[in-house]
């Protein structure tokens, strides 16, 4: 239950952050290394947010 909620929140955060920061499939096609760096950064931030939310909720 908590795992599913965390995964859903993680996916939603990644989607929102990528959209907000302009990390698109077009960027991926044009400059793959930049896209990877930016997505890794987004994933790390989203993971940290989800961890903090879960810790504070429990």
Image (spheres, rainbow, N blue to C red):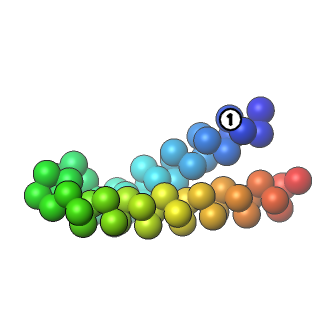
Residue at 77% from the left image edge and 32% from the top image edge: 1
Tally of numbered tags: 1
Q: Is residue 1 left or right of residue 46?
A: right
Q: Is 8 above or below relative to 10?
A: above
Tell which residue pokes out farthest to the right in this image.
58
Q: Which element type, helix, strand or loop, lies under badge 1?
A: helix
How far across and down, in percent of the image, does residue 4 sit? Answer: 68, 35
How far across and down, in percent of the image, does residue 27 sit? Answer: 18, 58
How far across and down, in percent of the image, does residue 36 sit? Answer: 31, 59
Q: Nearer the viewer, residue 31 or 24?
A: 31
Residue at 51% from the left image edge and 47% from the top image edge: 12
Q: Is residue 15 left or right of residue 31?
A: right
Residue at 25% from the left image edge and 54% from the top image edge: 24
Residue at 24% from the left image edge and 66% from the top image edge: 34
Q: Residues within 10 Å of mark 1 (few under 14, many from 20)?
A: few
Q: Is 22 above or below relative to 8?
A: below
* Residue located beneath label 1 in the image: 4
Q: Is residue 43 left or right of residue 9?
A: left
How far across and down, in percent of the image, does residue 31 sit? Answer: 15, 61
Tell which residue pokes out farthest to the front in this image.
33
């Amino acid at each position: 239950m908590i795992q599913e909620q965390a995964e859903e929140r993680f996916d939603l955060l990644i989607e929102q952050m990528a959209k907000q920061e302009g990390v698109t499939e077009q960027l991926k096609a044009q400059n793959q290394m930049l896209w990877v760096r930016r997505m890794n950064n987004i994933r790390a931030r989203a993971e940290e947010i989800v961890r903090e939310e879960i810790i504070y909720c429990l």
